[in-house]
DNA sequence: TTAAGTTTGTCTAGTGAATAAACAAAGATT
DNA sequence: AATCTTTGTTTATTCACTAGACAAACTTAA
């Protein structure tokens, strides 16, 4: 007979409490045992014992004494951020960006390669090369590389298979399996917008929000949903296809099969197509922004127009989710100066009061690092919850 | 200092395990202690002890022996469904529907009143009258009325205040507080579509789905979201305003302030307005269906047209949430014969393959009882989790 | 300077919930 | 009739947490 759900016993209690102590240290370090006990509600003795195990596992360490508040001085605890490292990668359409991070998400090394040929085997070779390079940059440590995470612009299943990455022309690539077989460390493959959402939630502009929608505006539009503080993925991981939400019911056909999709009006592709039609030759986002900065009315108009269409979709998002925060990320974020006011005007004009008053609109704080940092956060979280209680590997 | 999160100790363990045993009995009764141990993974002794407490609390009872499978015959356990009762109400725009249910959701009594005057005080008087009537119908029991739940067509805060019910013309009505002060039992006030979603999930067509979107198509459109098996409410409970999702970016103005809202094309109001324009005098949904049943091409066309627009919005829903199931409920559900094929055609034509293949489209199984049964489910769940471990009241 | 009070962190005894294993009861099978 | 199975209870044990005592280290006030 199959196990229905979680049962509770002392082992689970200890594991959960230990994870809670670790998380508290992660979030509030430097912090003393006494403060942890206060903050978590756990007994002082319990905290002492769990902390001592965490020290034995090299996940945290003591760091001198803090200031007295009228009694014995507290011993401050710090996360042992160099106990292990993550390799976190944003596998984009034209380039691969990879970082080596410690367990606090500090970037120790960063590498980027551009490519034109999107053939899978060639990109995989570049990916291996980039990962190997980052791996070489990692200092000696207790746990070594604790995880490799790849954010990809496509539909990813729960077990890290890329079902479809339209802009790369890839179908059914079991990337997680391939990388695990090659490196023998935990591998996470996730949609680029999902990762971006998590990156902004953990390290970026969304640290205070538990209901956050991240919009990745690039060639197409991807959306990552943080609901109740966690990434929401839908039944099989395919949620967030909001780029293919119809905003014009009899609009033009999209290659996805639908009509009037949001990304036909509000993406980088839409912007460049319109620019082309308006007489800009071989326009790029960067070029259009420059031209706009020089006061070109046509370019300004183009950018503001995309912003307005973004506002239409974001208004829908606000109505659908009643989020605390909507974050605009990826390449079009660079046109912040022109698109954000346009989005705000549209929201102000069209959104329902209750929902509108709750929501904050922001540009991705991590800039082009939202996705890599999200993958880093996934890697770190996985390590702390899954292997955090295992004995030290040497 | 504020408590950050749940800490785990023996008390919590016991409470959770007891709730798990109760839930298992709820879902699989009649069931033996041995089977519960197998299914939950708990030790036989633990189950025995928890079961004996639940029996003492009159929440369950033994009911003879079951069939032997080669050994001692098992003692079967049943939920004591008459240990208490719920009063669950669908407070609609033109009528109030109320039911008295036992703890399994069986309806013991049902009352309905219609009203025209939407003045709050008059409706409240009717509501009191209806609740009092149902209360009188409740048999003597251990726990009496364990909860009163009201589903309302409007925006409801986390603490049961109706912020706005446009079709009733109500604003800022603290209904939960008012009813609690009057009846002194736990009161739940929830949006009608949220309740409908939960009703279909627990007692209706969605019992197998953990990712379910319920669309309540009536004068307007409301949407209830079941994500990861639970009702999703957004930051402050205002999610699911999908009726005000733009599906035509430069469409007509909606009274909500937005443009081209879905409910301007796909609601009962939209249908009736169009019927009027097409020469039907004082049309009602029932009348249009009858006319269509008699083969009137115009009426059929009107209904199929609404179905097609419903399909546009539901396609968006499928892209946004990757749900397992989309359920069509409330009044327009009656036109099932005409609208469902139209919705299906639109989905077939426009939705993305991955998401389309995952999703099931269904009509609400509970018909016009989705909302009341959802409220019953809320009441029962609240009783079992919050008061399930309290001593018996007499 | 001394005494009293505070804060931190450890240690010990005790509690309570779960588990494993033994056991009794009640049936099926051969 | 003897043996095997299944169910449900009982008993002994384990283990994580808690309360409270205690020592160490510090501040404050007389």
Image (spheres, coloured by chain):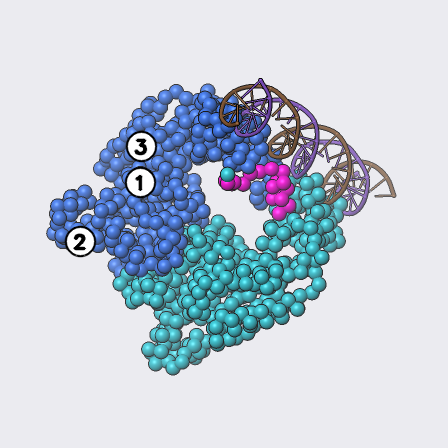
Chain colours: A cyan, B blue, C brown, D purple
Q: Position of residue C16 (x, y in %)?
A: 62, 29
Q: Which residue is mark 2?
A: B301
SS class of the residue under badge 2? Answer: helix
Image-based side of A43 in relation to B226, left or right: right
Q: Position of residue B31 (x, y in %)?
A: 46, 30
Q: Earlier in the sequence, mark 3 or mark 1?
A: 3
How dense is the environment of label 2, judged by Cα within 10 Å: few (below 14), some, or many (20 and up)? few
Q: Which residue is mark 1?
A: B365
Whether residue B340 is visible: yes
Q: Which residues lie in the magenta part?
A: A2-19
> Can you say whether A71 is above or below A263 in the image?
above
Mark sitting on residue B98: 3
Label 2 or label 3, whichever lies nearer to me, is 2
- Which residue occupies the foreground of this view, A233 or B128? A233
Could you tell me which chain the residue with mark 2 belongs to?
Answer: B
Labels 2 and 3 share a subunit: yes
Asked if the residues shown at circle 2 and circle 3 are in contact, with their CB atoms under 8 angstroms apart, the answer is: no
């Amino acid at each position: 007979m199959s196990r229905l759900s979680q049962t509770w016993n002392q082992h689970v209690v200890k594991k959960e409490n230990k994870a809670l102590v670790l998380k508290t240290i992660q979030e509030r370090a430097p912090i003393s045992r006494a403060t942890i006990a206060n903050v978590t509600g756990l007994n002082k003795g319990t905290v002492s014992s769990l902390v001592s195990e965490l020290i034995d596992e090299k996940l945290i360490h003591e760091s001198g004494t803090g200031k007295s508040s009228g009694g014995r001085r507290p011993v401050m605890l710090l996360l042992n951020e160099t106990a292990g490292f993550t390799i976190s990668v944003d596998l984009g359409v034209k380039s691969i960006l990879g970082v080596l991070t410690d367990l606090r998400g500090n970037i120790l090394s960063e590498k980027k390669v551009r490519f034109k040929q999107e053939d899978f085997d060639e990109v995989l070779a570049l990916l291996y090369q980039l990962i190997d390079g980052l791996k070489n940059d990692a200092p000696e440590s207790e746990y070594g590389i604790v995880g490799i995470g790849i954010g990809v612009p496509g539909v990813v299943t729960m077990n890290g298979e890329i079902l479809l990455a339209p802009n790369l022309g890839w179908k059914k690539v079991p990337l997680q399996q391939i990388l695990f077989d090659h490196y023998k460390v935990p591998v996470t493959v996730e949609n680029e917008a999902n990762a971006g959402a998590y990156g902004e939630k953990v390290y970026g502009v969304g640290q205070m929000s538990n209901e956050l929608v991240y919009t990745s505006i690039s060639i197409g539009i991807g959306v990552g949903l943080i609901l109740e503080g966690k990434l929401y993925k839908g039944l099989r991981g395919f949620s967030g296809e909001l780029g293919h939400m119809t905003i014009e019911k009899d609009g033009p056909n999209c290659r996805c099969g639908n009509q009037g999709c949001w990304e036909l009006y509000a993406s980088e592709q839409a912007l460049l197509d319109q620019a082309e039609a308006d007489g800009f030759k071989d326009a790029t986002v960067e070029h259009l922004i420059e031209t706009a900065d020089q006061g070109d009315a046509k370019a300004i108009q183009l950018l503001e127009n995309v912003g307005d269409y973004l506002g239409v979709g974001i208004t829908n998002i606000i109505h659908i989710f009643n989020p605390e925060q909507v974050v605009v990320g990826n390449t079009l974020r660079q046109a912040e100066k022109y698109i954000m006011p346009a989005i705000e005007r549209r929201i102000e004009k069209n959104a329902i009061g209750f929902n509108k008053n709750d929501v904050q609109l922001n540009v991705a704080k991590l800039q082009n690092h939202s996705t890599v940092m999200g993958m880093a956060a996934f890697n770190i979280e996985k390590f702390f919850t899954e292997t955090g209680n295992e004995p030290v590997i040497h």
